[in-house]
Image: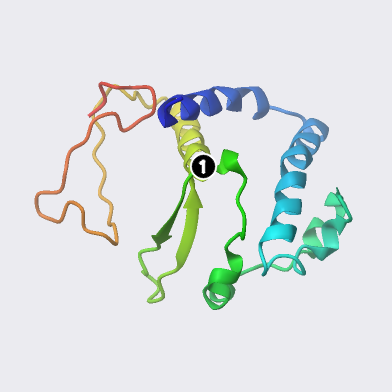
């Protein structure tokens, strides 16, 4: 299945879950968070002790969520590769490295996977739906990338800026 098709399937699932009441939302979040937290505790060296407050063996106690220490940018930069998972589940897809723009003067190197891309684009598409943005229309953006793939003043044009809308320019 193509990545765009997976993004569309995820996007189409979001309306089913976004209007859950509090108890439905809590149950749904726990169902998603429990395997993620257990994976992180087992595979990410810097996370095992941080996640201790919510972990009870193979169970997760979400009532203690606020006890997990907040990780700030400095922590993430200092810990670096200790935040990389030693093993990734197959469903996460390919992993690649990215670097933030460094607008604070301190760029952050981090890993992303295809599952994150699907979630990010699906959630962005939900925002477009909420705002009634037509993916078949033209969209102009001004963004800066650390890697200058399309340096000023010419920039670049691309098609299909919104998943599932092939004629958008």
Residue at x 74% of width, y 59% of height:
41
| Placement of 102 over or under 63, stated as above or below | below
Between 64 and 110, which is closer to the camera in this rendering?
110
In which quarter of the view is residue 104 placed? bottom left
Please state if 80 lies on the left or on the right of 55 as rendered.
Answer: left
| Placement of 16 over or under 29, stated as above or below | above
| Placement of 18 over or under 36, stated as above or below | above
Q: Residue furthest right?
A: 56
SS class, disc 1 = loop
Residue at x 82% of width, y 64% of height:
52
Residue at x 65% of width, y 22% of height:
16
Residue 11 percent across, percent down from the top left? 52, 27
Circle 1 residue? 93
Residue 138 percent across, percent down from the top left? 23, 29
Between 157 and 38, which is closer to the camera in this rendering?
38
Please state if 146 lies on the left or on the right of 17 as rendered.
Answer: left
| Placement of 117 over or under 166, stated as above or below | below
Residue at x 71% of width, y 52% of height:
39
Is residue 130 at all visible to an observer of this figure?
no
């Amino acid at each position: 299945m193509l990545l765009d098709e997976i993004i569309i399937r995820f996007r189409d699932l979001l309306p089913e879950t976004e209007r859950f009441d509090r108890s439905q939302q809590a149950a749904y979040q726990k169902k998603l968070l429990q395997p993620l937290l257990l994976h992180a505790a087992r595979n990410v060296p810097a996370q095992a002790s941080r996640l201790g407050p919510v972990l009870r063996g193979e169970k997760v106690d979400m009532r203690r969520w606020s006890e997990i220490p907040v990780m700030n940018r400095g922590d993430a930069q200092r810990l670096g590769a200790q935040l990389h998972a030693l093993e990734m589940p197959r469903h996460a897809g390919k992993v690649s490295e990215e670097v933030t723009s460094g607008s604070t003067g301190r760029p952050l190197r981090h890993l992303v996977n295809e599952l994150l891309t699907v979630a990010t684009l699906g959630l962005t598409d939900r925002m477009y739906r909420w705002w009634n943005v037509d993916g078949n229309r033209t969209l102009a953006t001004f963004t800066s990338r650390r890697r200058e793939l399309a340096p000023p003043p010419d920039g670049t044009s691309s098609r299909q800026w919104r998943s599932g809308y092939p004629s958008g320019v």
